[in-house]
Image: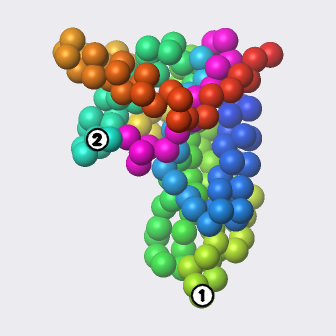
Amino acid sequence: MHLFSENLAVEISSYYRNLALGHGVVPKVFTLVNAEGDQYLFFIDDLPMGSDDEKNQFLAYIVQAHEAVCYARGTLVIVEKNQQFIEFAVIDRDDTDAIVCSAELTRDMDDKPISLSEFDKTLVKKGSIIFGGLFEPVQLSEEKVEDFESLWLEMKSKILHRSMGL
């Protein structure tokens, strides 16, 4: 597993802890890191697309266009109103396993997040994760590629970009 993958798991855990407890929000997050250590992070719900299929095509396009070595995707999972979890998975390009992290979120009577357990990390087969195949080549029309390139250029100024360089 790439060093960036391990670091990404730790970082996303902290990021979600800050978002949930510090700001009271748990967005759907996507982040990728390329071989140079450039990291891009944005909220999936901010993508101006209606269908999950189109969002997944865009994410696969971004992963491949930026030659990502790993990516992570996270969300809030609600089992019942009083049983909620923040879960994310880190997918490594060159590893058959992925890191899946989960932490239980507790809310008060006003539905405000008040505590988050430590994230449990588990290794699972990459193929068992619904969105684990973003490294697989995606066939897109020239028009769709142009749309995705244009959207990415538009988004870049609004998303978190930093270097995890060694």
Is residue 90 visible in the rendered structure shown here? yes
Taking the magenta stretch, the answer to whether it contains residue 69 is no
Q: Is residue 94 above or below residue 6?
A: above
Residue located 56% across and 58% down the image: 26
Measure the alpha-carbon separation of dots 2 and 1: 34 Å
Residue 120 position in % (x across, y down): 69, 53
Residue at which label 1 appears: 109
Looking at the image, residue 134 sits to the left or right of residue 158; the answer is left
Magenta range is 35-47
Identified at 64% across, 20% down, the residue is 38
Q: Is residue 97 visible?
A: no
Displayed quadrant of residue 32:
top right
Q: Which residue is mark 2?
A: 49
Whether residues under marks 2 and 1 lie with C-beta atoms below 8 angstroms apart, the answer is no
Q: What's the amino acid at mark 2?
A: Met
Q: Quarter holding the C terminus?
A: top right
Q: Residue furthest bottom?
A: 109
Number of on-image labels: 2
Can you give x and y, in whole percent of width and height, for residue 135 in the image? 43, 21
The disc labelled 1 sits on which kind of residue? Met
